[in-house]
Image: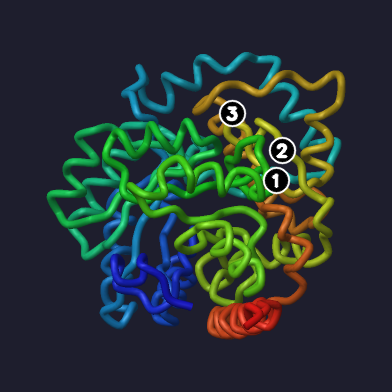
Amino acid sequence: MRTQICDRLGIEYPVVAFTPSEHVAAAVSRAGGLGVLGCVRFNDAGELDQVLDWMDSNTDGRPYGVDVVMPNRMPEEGNAADLSSHIPDEHRAFVERTLAELGVPELDSHPDGGAGVLGWLHSVARAHVDIALRHRISLIANALGSPPGDVIDAAHDAGVQVAALAGRASHARAHVDRGVDIVVAQGYEAGGHTGEIGSMVLLPEIVDEVGSEATVLAAGGIGSGRQIAAALALGADGVWMGSYWLTTTEYLITMSNSSTMQQALLAATSGDTVRTRIYSGKPARLLKTRWTEAWARPDAPSPLPMPLQNLLVGEAHARIAASRDPSVVAMPVGQIVGRMNAVRPVTEIMAELIAGFDEAADRLQATRVSPAR
């Protein structure tokens, strides 16, 4: 299982793993893939700097990347307090009423002042990029499409590849025209921010559009070696996997309060997700729980645009995480959750992916018929 992206990024296998956990990202890189650390959870730039110092020292000299959330154009924004003033009282009241109905207790303390995750702000994402470029990263990925041109230029000047997610072939074309090196074709079934076209249709469309000019990775619905083989058969040069790493033992090291979340994911089937704007203000696939169902009721207000929605629900998410109740978990995850049935180390998952790919490749090879003589 080796493609051109392995040589481009200096990795052994064409498996790119997005994760908010530095322990997962480092383990994937050590195992021969490319771990990509999600930066959106870092409100404090100094904390990200320290974590990337740790990544530099714990990846055995192997490459790794970072993922930021940055719109292509600089929006008008103030600080978190200024933005919070634009959140309607009816939305705040609904959140408080819903948490009470769900039996979610208040936090003992408010270390972040209830501001939520500030990594959704453009200014914070730019600080993430500046810090990341001081470290030995190989890739910067942007979850909101093409980064601004100056960010792409700065990455290229540092010898860093730029990746962007795309939910349509037209998005992929725009990314490549702006200088993006790697397009992540993210299908409808993927977790987190995702579009409306399924991977089986989307991936070959994007490969046909930009595959001769850029590297294309497949994302969405990938949790086995045979699914990796299918992605490569459709023209991808590798895969981008996110959800599948949420039930790893390494994830718990970083997110020590995630055992409840993992319980909820282990019990879920592929039909237990929903695509909604309640997480960040943009369409994202989440685990279906009593929290998501409350937002689907007729009396629920419409989600606010990014970044206001995340500021609205930031403290609610912290309270939900602390409640230790799997039935109210607020977690992005893809439909592949139906295959996430055990908590396992990264090395075991990587070995299984490689073996499964080899089996699928052998099975396909066996179907080839020699031409008649």
Image spot of residue 39 (x, y percent):
40, 51
Q: Which residue is mark 3?
A: 281
Above or below 221: residue 178? above
Image spot of residue 339 (x, y percent):
75, 68
| Residue at 40% across, 51% down | 67
Above or below 80: residue 198? below
| Residue at 33% across, 47% down | 213
Q: CA distance from mark 2 to mark 1?
A: 6 Å
Horizontal relation, residue 137 to residue 252: left or right: left
The amino acid type, in three-letter code, at marker 3 is Gly
Horizontal relation, residue 362 to residue 67: left or right: right
Q: Nearer the viewer, residue 78 or 272?
A: 272
Above or below 258: residue 141? above
Q: Nearer the viewer, residue 231 or 149?
A: 231
Image spot of residue 293 (x, y percent):
83, 36
Label drawn at residue 286: 1
Q: Secondary structure at mark 1?
A: strand
Above or below 102: residue 137? below
Q: Which residue is mark 2?
A: 275
Q: Earlier in the sequence, mark 2 or mark 3?
A: 2
Q: Secondary structure at mark 2?
A: strand
- Residue 66: image quadrant is bottom left
The amino acid type, in three-letter code, at marker 2 is Arg
| Residue density around tag 3, few if under 14, some if 14–19, many if 20 or more, within 10 Å | some
| Residue density around tag 2, few if under 14, some if 14–19, many if 20 or more, within 10 Å | many
Name the residue furthest left: 157
